[in-house]
Amino acid sequence: MTIKEIQDQIIEDFSMFDDWMDRYAMLIEMGKECPIIDEQYRNDQYLINGCQSRVWLHAELKDGKVYYTADSDAVITKGIIYLLIKVFSGQTPQDILSADLSFLDEIGLKEHLSPTRSNGLLSMLKQMLLYAEAFSI
Amino acid sequence: MDINTLRQQFPVLDQQVYGKPLVYLDNAATTQKPLCVIERERDYYLHENCNIHRGVHYLSQMATEAYEHARRTVARFINAKETHEIVFTRGTTESLNLLATSLGTENGKRKTENGKLSVFRSPFSVLITAMEHHSNLVPWQQMVQLYGGKLLVAPMDDNGVLDLQAYEDLLKQGPQIVAMAHVSNTLGTVNPVKEMIRLAHQYGAITVVDGAQSIAHLPIDVQDLDCDFFVFSGHKMYAPMGIGGLYGKTELLEQMPPYQFGGEMVDTVSFEKTTFNKLPFKFEAGTPNVGAALGLETAIQFLEHLDRKAVEEHENQLVKTTMEKLSAIEGMRFIGKAPEHSGLVSFIIDGIHPYDLGTIIDKMGVAVRTGHHCAEPVMTRFGIPGTVRASFALYNTLEEVEVLVKAVERAANMLR
Protein backbone atom coordinates (compact mmCIF):
# COMPACT_ATOMS: atom_id res chain seq x y z
CA MET A 1 0.00 0.00 0.00
CA THR A 2 1.15 3.54 -0.58
CA ILE A 3 1.58 6.02 2.25
CA LYS A 4 -1.62 7.76 1.21
CA GLU A 5 -3.60 4.50 1.21
CA ILE A 6 -2.35 3.57 4.67
CA GLN A 7 -3.23 7.02 5.97
CA ASP A 8 -6.74 6.78 4.54
CA GLN A 9 -7.12 3.41 6.22
CA ILE A 10 -6.10 4.90 9.58
CA ILE A 11 -8.51 7.81 9.15
CA GLU A 12 -11.28 5.33 8.38
CA ASP A 13 -10.39 3.20 11.43
CA PHE A 14 -10.52 6.22 13.69
CA SER A 15 -13.71 7.61 12.17
CA MET A 16 -15.62 4.66 13.61
CA PHE A 17 -15.37 6.34 16.99
CA ASP A 18 -17.10 9.57 17.92
CA ASP A 19 -15.95 9.48 21.48
CA TRP A 20 -12.41 10.61 22.23
CA MET A 21 -12.12 7.89 24.89
CA ASP A 22 -12.65 5.17 22.34
CA ARG A 23 -10.04 6.77 20.11
CA TYR A 24 -7.54 6.80 22.91
CA ALA A 25 -8.46 3.25 23.86
CA MET A 26 -7.69 2.25 20.28
CA LEU A 27 -4.45 4.17 20.34
CA ILE A 28 -3.43 2.43 23.56
CA GLU A 29 -4.20 -0.95 21.96
CA MET A 30 -2.17 0.02 18.90
CA GLY A 31 0.75 0.91 21.12
CA LYS A 32 0.92 -2.72 22.14
CA GLU A 33 1.38 -3.77 18.48
CA CYS A 34 4.26 -1.38 17.86
CA PRO A 35 7.29 -3.14 16.32
CA ILE A 36 9.55 -2.94 19.33
CA ILE A 37 13.12 -1.85 18.92
CA ASP A 38 15.71 -4.59 19.32
CA GLU A 39 17.20 -4.63 22.82
CA GLN A 40 20.67 -3.81 21.44
CA TYR A 41 19.38 -0.45 20.17
CA ARG A 42 17.41 0.42 23.29
CA ASN A 43 20.19 2.63 24.59
CA ASP A 44 21.15 6.28 24.83
CA GLN A 45 22.47 6.38 21.29
CA TYR A 46 18.97 5.76 19.94
CA LEU A 47 17.14 7.70 22.64
CA ILE A 48 15.09 10.77 21.81
CA ASN A 49 14.59 12.58 25.06
CA GLY A 50 11.32 14.39 25.46
CA CYS A 51 10.71 16.21 28.69
CA GLN A 52 7.69 14.05 29.52
CA SER A 53 8.24 10.70 27.85
CA ARG A 54 11.17 8.94 26.24
CA VAL A 55 11.34 7.43 22.76
CA TRP A 56 13.84 5.04 21.20
CA LEU A 57 14.00 4.78 17.43
CA HIS A 58 16.00 2.67 14.99
CA ALA A 59 15.80 2.33 11.21
CA GLU A 60 17.38 0.17 8.57
CA LEU A 61 17.30 -0.01 4.78
CA LYS A 62 16.32 -3.31 3.16
CA ASP A 63 15.86 -3.64 -0.62
CA GLY A 64 15.56 0.08 -0.98
CA LYS A 65 12.89 0.41 1.70
CA VAL A 66 13.10 1.82 5.21
CA TYR A 67 12.03 -0.25 8.23
CA TYR A 68 11.58 1.41 11.59
CA THR A 69 11.41 -0.04 15.08
CA ALA A 70 10.81 1.97 18.23
CA ASP A 71 9.68 2.03 21.82
CA SER A 72 8.48 4.51 24.43
CA ASP A 73 7.88 4.41 28.16
CA ALA A 74 4.44 6.05 27.69
CA VAL A 75 1.74 4.04 25.91
CA ILE A 76 -0.06 6.94 24.25
CA THR A 77 3.25 8.10 22.83
CA LYS A 78 3.87 4.54 21.72
CA GLY A 79 0.48 4.37 20.00
CA ILE A 80 1.30 7.41 17.93
CA ILE A 81 4.74 6.02 17.15
CA TYR A 82 3.02 2.92 15.90
CA LEU A 83 0.82 5.01 13.60
CA LEU A 84 3.86 6.74 12.16
CA ILE A 85 5.72 3.45 11.73
CA LYS A 86 2.68 1.91 10.08
CA VAL A 87 2.65 4.77 7.60
CA PHE A 88 6.39 4.93 6.92
CA SER A 89 7.81 1.43 7.37
CA GLY A 90 8.34 -0.48 4.14
CA GLN A 91 8.31 2.70 2.03
CA THR A 92 11.13 4.16 -0.01
CA PRO A 93 13.11 7.06 1.43
CA GLN A 94 11.81 9.31 -1.37
CA ASP A 95 8.17 8.52 -0.59
CA ILE A 96 8.74 9.10 3.11
CA LEU A 97 10.36 12.46 2.51
CA SER A 98 7.51 13.67 0.33
CA ALA A 99 4.70 12.35 2.54
CA ASP A 100 1.88 14.58 3.73
CA LEU A 101 1.20 14.13 7.46
CA SER A 102 -2.15 15.85 7.73
CA PHE A 103 -3.79 12.53 8.63
CA LEU A 104 -2.74 13.11 12.25
CA ASP A 105 -4.80 16.26 12.22
CA GLU A 106 -7.78 14.44 10.76
CA ILE A 107 -7.80 11.83 13.50
CA GLY A 108 -7.48 14.51 16.19
CA LEU A 109 -4.01 13.63 17.42
CA LYS A 110 -2.06 16.53 16.03
CA GLU A 111 -1.72 18.12 19.48
CA HIS A 112 0.64 15.29 20.41
CA LEU A 113 3.06 16.50 17.78
CA SER A 114 3.09 20.05 19.03
CA PRO A 115 6.54 21.41 19.91
CA THR A 116 5.21 22.46 23.31
CA ARG A 117 4.04 18.97 24.15
CA SER A 118 7.61 17.86 24.89
CA ASN A 119 6.87 14.15 24.63
CA GLY A 120 9.64 13.47 22.12
CA LEU A 121 7.24 12.73 19.27
CA LEU A 122 8.07 15.71 17.13
CA SER A 123 11.76 15.02 17.53
CA MET A 124 11.07 11.41 16.67
CA LEU A 125 9.26 12.36 13.49
CA LYS A 126 12.20 14.56 12.53
CA GLN A 127 14.53 11.66 13.28
CA MET A 128 12.44 9.34 11.07
CA LEU A 129 12.75 11.81 8.22
CA LEU A 130 16.48 12.18 8.88
CA TYR A 131 16.91 8.42 8.53
CA ALA A 132 15.03 8.58 5.21
CA GLU A 133 17.21 11.48 4.14
CA ALA A 134 20.37 9.57 5.01
CA PHE A 135 19.16 6.44 3.21
CA SER A 136 18.24 8.40 0.10
CA ILE A 137 21.82 9.42 -0.60
CA MET B 1 -15.76 31.27 53.93
CA ASP B 2 -18.17 30.61 51.07
CA ILE B 3 -16.20 29.02 48.26
CA ASN B 4 -18.89 29.51 45.65
CA THR B 5 -19.03 33.26 46.23
CA LEU B 6 -15.26 33.33 46.20
CA ARG B 7 -15.14 31.47 42.89
CA GLN B 8 -17.15 34.24 41.25
CA GLN B 9 -14.08 36.37 41.76
CA PHE B 10 -12.21 34.04 39.35
CA PRO B 11 -13.99 34.16 35.99
CA VAL B 12 -11.42 31.92 34.29
CA LEU B 13 -12.62 28.98 36.38
CA ASP B 14 -16.08 29.22 34.88
CA GLN B 15 -15.47 27.57 31.53
CA GLN B 16 -15.63 24.28 29.75
CA VAL B 17 -12.73 22.40 28.20
CA TYR B 18 -13.47 19.56 25.75
CA GLY B 19 -17.11 20.08 26.72
CA LYS B 20 -16.45 19.42 30.42
CA PRO B 21 -16.32 21.94 33.27
CA LEU B 22 -12.73 22.95 33.90
CA VAL B 23 -11.24 21.54 37.09
CA TYR B 24 -8.10 23.58 37.59
CA LEU B 25 -5.62 21.75 39.81
CA ASP B 26 -2.35 23.19 38.56
CA ASN B 27 -2.10 25.97 41.10
CA ALA B 28 1.47 25.22 42.10
CA ALA B 29 2.40 26.23 38.55
CA THR B 30 0.31 29.39 38.70
CA THR B 31 -2.87 30.44 40.47
CA GLN B 32 -5.76 32.14 38.75
CA LYS B 33 -6.31 35.85 39.37
CA PRO B 34 -9.30 37.40 41.10
CA LEU B 35 -11.21 40.20 39.39
CA CYS B 36 -9.89 42.79 41.84
CA VAL B 37 -6.31 42.03 40.78
CA ILE B 38 -7.16 42.08 37.08
CA GLU B 39 -9.02 45.36 37.53
CA ARG B 40 -6.20 46.92 39.53
CA GLU B 41 -3.70 46.28 36.75
CA ARG B 42 -6.20 47.44 34.14
CA ASP B 43 -6.89 50.62 36.11
CA TYR B 44 -3.21 51.37 36.27
CA TYR B 45 -2.96 51.32 32.49
CA LEU B 46 -6.23 53.19 32.08
CA HIS B 47 -5.50 56.02 34.49
CA GLU B 48 -2.07 55.95 36.09
CA ASN B 49 0.52 54.59 33.67
CA CYS B 50 3.77 56.44 33.97
CA ASN B 51 7.44 55.77 34.45
CA ILE B 52 8.36 56.07 38.09
CA HIS B 53 11.03 57.70 40.23
CA ARG B 54 11.83 60.16 37.42
CA GLY B 55 9.22 62.68 36.50
CA VAL B 56 8.41 65.78 38.45
CA HIS B 57 4.97 65.75 36.89
CA TYR B 58 1.80 64.73 38.65
CA LEU B 59 1.20 61.34 37.01
CA SER B 60 4.76 60.16 37.60
CA GLN B 61 4.58 61.12 41.23
CA MET B 62 1.28 59.30 41.66
CA ALA B 63 2.65 56.15 40.00
CA THR B 64 5.80 56.31 42.11
CA GLU B 65 3.78 56.69 45.28
CA ALA B 66 1.53 53.75 44.29
CA TYR B 67 4.56 51.56 43.51
CA GLU B 68 6.25 52.40 46.81
CA HIS B 69 2.95 51.83 48.62
CA ALA B 70 2.89 48.34 47.12
CA ARG B 71 6.38 47.77 48.48
CA ARG B 72 5.21 48.77 51.96
CA THR B 73 2.30 46.34 51.66
CA VAL B 74 4.65 43.48 50.73
CA ALA B 75 6.93 44.37 53.64
CA ARG B 76 4.00 44.29 56.03
CA PHE B 77 2.65 41.04 54.56
CA ILE B 78 5.83 39.10 55.29
CA ASN B 79 6.69 41.23 58.34
CA ALA B 80 9.96 42.68 57.08
CA LYS B 81 11.56 45.11 59.51
CA GLU B 82 12.17 47.79 56.88
CA THR B 83 10.42 48.58 53.61
CA HIS B 84 13.76 48.92 51.80
CA GLU B 85 14.39 45.25 52.53
CA ILE B 86 11.92 44.39 49.77
CA VAL B 87 13.33 44.29 46.24
CA PHE B 88 10.84 43.83 43.41
CA THR B 89 11.90 41.22 40.87
CA ARG B 90 10.23 39.23 38.11
CA GLY B 91 9.72 36.37 40.53
CA THR B 92 11.41 33.61 42.51
CA THR B 93 13.78 32.59 39.74
CA GLU B 94 15.05 36.10 39.20
CA SER B 95 15.37 36.66 42.94
CA LEU B 96 17.53 33.55 43.27
CA ASN B 97 19.64 34.50 40.27
CA LEU B 98 20.11 37.94 41.77
CA LEU B 99 21.37 36.36 44.99
CA ALA B 100 23.62 33.77 43.36
CA THR B 101 25.08 36.38 41.04
CA SER B 102 25.50 39.16 43.56
CA LEU B 103 26.87 36.99 46.34
CA GLY B 104 29.03 35.25 43.73
CA THR B 105 30.32 38.51 42.34
CA GLU B 106 31.45 39.52 45.77
CA ASN B 107 33.13 36.18 46.08
CA GLY B 108 34.80 36.58 42.72
CA LYS B 109 35.94 40.10 43.51
CA ARG B 110 37.68 38.98 46.67
CA LYS B 111 39.19 36.19 44.67
CA THR B 112 41.09 38.65 42.52
CA GLU B 113 41.94 40.94 45.41
CA ASN B 114 43.25 38.41 47.86
CA GLY B 115 43.99 35.49 45.61
CA LYS B 116 41.59 33.51 47.78
CA LEU B 117 38.45 31.65 46.79
CA SER B 118 36.11 32.72 49.48
CA VAL B 119 34.73 35.99 50.68
CA PHE B 120 33.83 34.32 53.95
CA ARG B 121 36.22 31.45 54.30
CA SER B 122 37.63 28.66 52.18
CA PRO B 123 36.59 26.16 50.86
CA PHE B 124 33.53 27.67 49.25
CA SER B 125 30.28 25.69 49.25
CA VAL B 126 26.50 26.07 49.09
CA LEU B 127 24.12 23.68 50.84
CA ILE B 128 20.71 22.92 49.35
CA THR B 129 18.17 20.16 49.99
CA ALA B 130 17.43 17.14 47.79
CA MET B 131 13.95 18.47 47.04
CA GLU B 132 14.77 21.81 45.40
CA HIS B 133 13.12 23.17 42.28
CA HIS B 134 15.69 23.71 39.51
CA SER B 135 15.46 27.46 40.22
CA ASN B 136 16.90 26.94 43.69
CA LEU B 137 19.51 24.51 42.42
CA VAL B 138 20.95 25.57 39.08
CA PRO B 139 21.89 29.18 40.05
CA TRP B 140 23.84 27.86 43.07
CA GLN B 141 25.36 25.03 41.08
CA GLN B 142 26.57 27.46 38.43
CA MET B 143 27.86 29.81 41.12
CA VAL B 144 29.96 27.15 42.86
CA GLN B 145 31.22 25.86 39.53
CA LEU B 146 32.30 29.35 38.55
CA TYR B 147 34.27 29.84 41.75
CA GLY B 148 35.58 26.32 42.17
CA GLY B 149 33.30 25.53 45.10
CA LYS B 150 31.09 22.64 45.98
CA LEU B 151 27.34 22.03 46.05
CA LEU B 152 26.26 20.10 49.14
CA VAL B 153 22.88 18.35 49.13
CA ALA B 154 20.97 17.42 52.29
CA PRO B 155 19.14 14.10 51.68
CA MET B 156 15.52 13.16 52.40
CA ASP B 157 13.84 9.88 53.30
CA ASP B 158 11.33 7.82 51.28
CA ASN B 159 8.45 9.94 52.54
CA GLY B 160 10.08 13.11 51.29
CA VAL B 161 11.07 14.30 54.75
CA LEU B 162 14.39 16.08 55.07
CA ASP B 163 17.04 14.24 57.11
CA LEU B 164 17.76 16.92 59.70
CA GLN B 165 20.71 15.02 61.19
CA ALA B 166 22.39 14.71 57.79
CA TYR B 167 21.59 18.39 57.20
CA GLU B 168 23.40 19.36 60.39
CA ASP B 169 26.34 17.10 59.54
CA LEU B 170 26.67 18.89 56.20
CA LEU B 171 26.55 22.25 57.96
CA LYS B 172 29.71 21.18 59.77
CA GLN B 173 31.48 21.28 56.41
CA GLY B 174 30.99 25.03 56.58
CA PRO B 175 28.85 26.06 53.61
CA GLN B 176 28.69 29.84 53.23
CA ILE B 177 25.13 29.77 51.92
CA VAL B 178 22.21 27.46 52.73
CA ALA B 179 19.27 27.58 50.30
CA MET B 180 16.07 25.69 51.15
CA ALA B 181 12.57 25.23 49.82
CA HIS B 182 9.96 26.26 52.36
CA VAL B 183 7.48 23.91 50.66
CA SER B 184 8.57 21.41 48.00
CA ASN B 185 6.84 21.98 44.65
CA THR B 186 7.00 18.28 43.85
CA LEU B 187 6.38 16.59 47.20
CA GLY B 188 4.39 19.16 49.14
CA THR B 189 6.75 18.70 52.09
CA VAL B 190 6.81 21.64 54.48
CA ASN B 191 10.39 21.92 55.65
CA PRO B 192 11.14 22.94 59.25
CA VAL B 193 12.78 26.10 57.94
CA LYS B 194 12.85 27.93 61.24
CA GLU B 195 14.89 25.16 62.83
CA MET B 196 17.02 24.81 59.68
CA ILE B 197 17.78 28.54 59.74
CA ARG B 198 18.67 28.44 63.44
CA LEU B 199 21.09 25.58 62.81
CA ALA B 200 22.59 27.19 59.71
CA HIS B 201 23.24 30.40 61.64
CA GLN B 202 24.93 28.40 64.38
CA TYR B 203 27.44 27.33 61.75
CA GLY B 204 27.75 30.83 60.34
CA ALA B 205 25.92 30.34 57.03
CA ILE B 206 23.70 32.80 55.18
CA THR B 207 20.17 31.43 54.76
CA VAL B 208 17.92 31.68 51.71
CA VAL B 209 14.30 30.49 51.84
CA ASP B 210 12.51 29.71 48.57
CA GLY B 211 8.94 30.68 49.40
CA ALA B 212 7.45 30.11 45.93
CA GLN B 213 5.18 27.33 47.17
CA SER B 214 4.53 28.59 50.68
CA ILE B 215 3.53 32.21 50.20
CA ALA B 216 -0.05 31.46 49.08
CA HIS B 217 -0.68 28.82 51.73
CA LEU B 218 1.19 29.64 54.94
CA PRO B 219 1.61 32.82 56.98
CA ILE B 220 5.09 34.23 56.42
CA ASP B 221 6.99 36.16 59.08
CA VAL B 222 10.59 36.72 57.97
CA GLN B 223 11.61 38.19 61.30
CA ASP B 224 10.27 35.22 63.19
CA LEU B 225 11.97 32.83 60.73
CA ASP B 226 15.12 34.95 61.04
CA CYS B 227 16.06 34.03 57.44
CA ASP B 228 18.61 36.26 55.74
CA PHE B 229 16.74 36.10 52.43
CA PHE B 230 13.22 35.09 51.42
CA VAL B 231 12.11 34.90 47.78
CA PHE B 232 8.68 34.47 46.19
CA SER B 233 6.60 34.90 43.04
CA GLY B 234 3.46 36.96 42.74
CA HIS B 235 1.78 34.75 40.18
CA LYS B 236 1.62 31.82 42.59
CA MET B 237 -0.34 33.94 45.09
CA TYR B 238 -3.15 35.32 42.88
CA ALA B 239 -1.08 38.25 41.59
CA PRO B 240 -0.08 38.88 37.95
CA MET B 241 2.87 37.22 36.29
CA GLY B 242 6.12 39.13 36.00
CA ILE B 243 6.31 40.34 39.58
CA GLY B 244 7.83 38.84 42.69
CA GLY B 245 10.06 39.72 45.53
CA LEU B 246 13.31 39.34 47.30
CA TYR B 247 13.47 40.07 51.00
CA GLY B 248 16.91 40.51 52.50
CA LYS B 249 18.26 41.76 55.80
CA THR B 250 19.49 45.32 55.46
CA GLU B 251 23.07 44.66 56.53
CA LEU B 252 23.48 41.94 53.89
CA LEU B 253 21.76 43.80 51.06
CA GLU B 254 23.95 46.82 51.86
CA GLN B 255 27.13 44.79 51.40
CA MET B 256 26.07 43.12 48.19
CA PRO B 257 27.04 44.55 44.80
CA PRO B 258 24.30 45.32 42.23
CA TYR B 259 23.08 42.51 40.03
CA GLN B 260 22.18 44.42 36.88
CA PHE B 261 23.23 47.86 35.79
CA GLY B 262 21.43 50.67 34.06
CA GLY B 263 18.83 53.27 34.83
CA GLU B 264 17.15 53.68 38.19
CA MET B 265 19.83 51.80 40.15
CA VAL B 266 22.47 54.55 39.92
CA ASP B 267 23.26 57.54 42.07
CA THR B 268 25.72 59.52 39.94
CA VAL B 269 27.23 58.55 36.61
CA SER B 270 30.25 59.88 34.77
CA PHE B 271 32.34 58.22 32.08
CA GLU B 272 34.94 57.43 34.72
CA LYS B 273 32.82 56.20 37.56
CA THR B 274 29.31 55.31 38.73
CA THR B 275 28.00 55.33 42.24
CA PHE B 276 24.94 53.30 43.04
CA ASN B 277 21.57 54.18 44.43
CA LYS B 278 20.57 53.20 47.95
CA LEU B 279 18.45 50.20 48.91
CA PRO B 280 16.28 48.83 47.45
CA PHE B 281 16.81 50.74 44.19
CA LYS B 282 20.35 49.57 43.56
CA PHE B 283 18.86 46.13 42.80
CA GLU B 284 16.10 47.41 40.51
CA ALA B 285 17.77 48.33 37.23
CA GLY B 286 15.51 49.51 34.45
CA THR B 287 11.81 50.24 34.40
CA PRO B 288 9.99 47.87 36.74
CA ASN B 289 6.66 46.16 36.15
CA VAL B 290 4.66 48.80 38.00
CA GLY B 291 1.23 47.53 36.97
CA ALA B 292 2.02 44.02 38.19
CA ALA B 293 3.42 45.36 41.47
CA LEU B 294 0.09 47.13 42.07
CA GLY B 295 -1.68 43.89 41.18
CA LEU B 296 0.48 42.13 43.74
CA GLU B 297 -0.53 44.62 46.38
CA THR B 298 -4.19 44.00 45.57
CA ALA B 299 -3.65 40.22 45.72
CA ILE B 300 -2.17 40.65 49.19
CA GLN B 301 -5.14 42.75 50.26
CA PHE B 302 -7.45 40.10 48.79
CA LEU B 303 -5.74 37.43 50.91
CA GLU B 304 -5.72 39.62 53.99
CA HIS B 305 -9.46 40.15 53.74
CA LEU B 306 -10.00 36.41 53.98
CA ASP B 307 -9.79 34.35 57.13
CA ARG B 308 -6.39 32.88 56.32
CA LYS B 309 -6.65 30.25 59.01
CA ALA B 310 -9.88 29.03 57.39
CA VAL B 311 -8.20 29.09 53.96
CA GLU B 312 -5.33 26.98 55.26
CA GLU B 313 -7.75 24.49 56.83
CA HIS B 314 -9.77 24.30 53.64
CA GLU B 315 -6.67 23.64 51.53
CA ASN B 316 -5.44 21.02 54.00
CA GLN B 317 -8.84 19.37 53.79
CA LEU B 318 -8.56 19.21 49.99
CA VAL B 319 -5.12 17.59 50.24
CA LYS B 320 -6.25 15.11 52.88
CA THR B 321 -9.43 14.11 51.03
CA THR B 322 -7.57 13.72 47.75
CA MET B 323 -5.04 11.37 49.32
CA GLU B 324 -7.72 9.36 51.11
CA LYS B 325 -9.82 8.88 47.99
CA LEU B 326 -6.94 8.26 45.58
CA SER B 327 -5.43 5.66 47.87
CA ALA B 328 -8.34 3.32 47.04
CA ILE B 329 -7.03 3.05 43.47
CA GLU B 330 -4.98 -0.08 42.84
CA GLY B 331 -1.26 0.53 42.47
CA MET B 332 -1.48 4.09 43.83
CA ARG B 333 1.81 5.40 45.13
CA PHE B 334 2.13 8.85 46.66
CA ILE B 335 5.42 10.63 46.09
CA GLY B 336 5.76 12.83 49.15
CA LYS B 337 4.12 11.59 52.31
CA ALA B 338 5.59 14.01 54.81
CA PRO B 339 3.35 14.58 57.84
CA GLU B 340 3.90 18.31 57.35
CA HIS B 341 2.36 18.69 53.93
CA SER B 342 0.90 21.63 52.05
CA GLY B 343 -0.98 22.50 48.90
CA LEU B 344 -0.51 19.49 46.65
CA VAL B 345 -0.64 15.75 46.08
CA SER B 346 1.94 14.05 43.88
CA PHE B 347 1.45 10.46 42.77
CA ILE B 348 2.11 7.71 40.28
CA ILE B 349 0.22 4.48 39.58
CA ASP B 350 2.19 1.26 39.13
CA GLY B 351 2.66 0.41 35.48
CA ILE B 352 1.17 3.67 34.20
CA HIS B 353 3.24 6.51 32.81
CA PRO B 354 2.33 9.94 34.28
CA TYR B 355 2.20 11.43 30.77
CA ASP B 356 -0.48 8.92 29.72
CA LEU B 357 -2.52 9.55 32.84
CA GLY B 358 -2.28 13.34 32.47
CA THR B 359 -3.26 13.15 28.79
CA ILE B 360 -6.40 11.13 29.53
CA ILE B 361 -7.63 13.14 32.50
CA ASP B 362 -7.01 16.37 30.59
CA LYS B 363 -9.67 15.15 28.18
CA MET B 364 -12.02 14.94 31.15
CA GLY B 365 -11.46 18.61 31.93
CA VAL B 366 -9.01 18.07 34.76
CA ALA B 367 -5.88 20.22 34.58
CA VAL B 368 -2.96 18.71 36.48
CA ARG B 369 0.75 18.84 35.90
CA THR B 370 2.69 15.76 34.83
CA GLY B 371 6.42 15.28 34.49
CA HIS B 372 9.36 16.09 36.67
CA HIS B 373 8.05 19.51 37.80
CA CYS B 374 11.44 21.16 37.24
CA ALA B 375 12.92 18.96 39.94
CA GLU B 376 14.64 16.16 38.04
CA PRO B 377 16.87 15.08 40.93
CA VAL B 378 13.74 14.38 42.98
CA MET B 379 12.52 11.99 40.28
CA THR B 380 15.93 10.33 40.17
CA ARG B 381 15.82 9.97 43.96
CA PHE B 382 12.52 8.06 43.74
CA GLY B 383 13.49 6.21 40.55
CA ILE B 384 10.48 7.41 38.55
CA PRO B 385 10.08 9.27 35.22
CA GLY B 386 7.75 11.84 36.74
CA THR B 387 4.59 12.22 38.78
CA VAL B 388 1.06 13.46 38.37
CA ARG B 389 0.61 16.49 40.58
CA ALA B 390 -2.71 17.94 41.70
CA SER B 391 -2.14 21.27 43.40
CA PHE B 392 -4.77 23.34 45.13
CA ALA B 393 -5.81 26.92 45.71
CA LEU B 394 -8.39 28.47 47.98
CA TYR B 395 -11.09 28.30 45.29
CA ASN B 396 -10.92 24.54 44.77
CA THR B 397 -13.79 22.44 46.11
CA LEU B 398 -14.35 18.94 47.43
CA GLU B 399 -16.58 18.35 44.38
CA GLU B 400 -13.55 19.01 42.19
CA VAL B 401 -11.61 16.46 44.20
CA GLU B 402 -14.37 13.97 43.39
CA VAL B 403 -14.03 14.73 39.67
CA LEU B 404 -10.25 14.30 39.87
CA VAL B 405 -10.54 10.93 41.63
CA LYS B 406 -13.15 9.63 39.17
CA ALA B 407 -11.05 10.81 36.23
CA VAL B 408 -7.93 9.11 37.57
CA GLU B 409 -9.88 5.89 38.18
CA ARG B 410 -11.26 5.90 34.67
CA ALA B 411 -7.90 6.70 33.10
CA ALA B 412 -6.17 3.99 35.13
CA ASN B 413 -8.70 1.43 33.92
CA MET B 414 -8.11 2.48 30.32
CA LEU B 415 -4.35 2.38 30.61
CA ARG B 416 -3.95 -0.90 32.44
Image (tube, grey):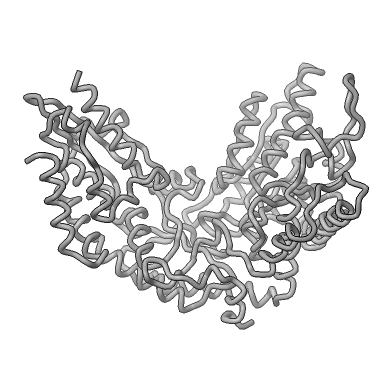
Q: Is residue B43 left or right of residue A137?
A: right
Image spot of residue B154 (x, y percent): 58, 44
Front position in the image: B299 or B221: B299
The residue located at (15%, 63%) in the rendering is A16
Instruction: Decide: is B396 above or below B124.
Output: below
Horizontal and vertical percent position of residue A6: 12, 45
* Nearer to me, A122 or A120: A122
Q: Position of residue B151 (x, y in %)?
A: 61, 34
Say how many tags the image has: 0
The answer to whether residue B327 is above or below residue B354 is below
| Residue B204 seen in the figure | no
User: Is residue B346 in view from this perspective?
Assistant: yes
Q: Residue at x 51, y 54 (%)?
A: B186
- Left or right, residue B38 beside residue B290: left
In front of the other: A14 or B315: A14
Classify A54 as above or below B13.
Answer: above
Q: Quadrant of the C terminus of chain A?
A: top left
> Residue B116, position in %: x, y?
76, 20
Q: Name the image quarter holding the N terminus of chain A.
A: top left
Question: Which quadrant of the view contains residue B67?
Answer: bottom right
Q: Residue at x 42, y 46 (%)?
A: A116
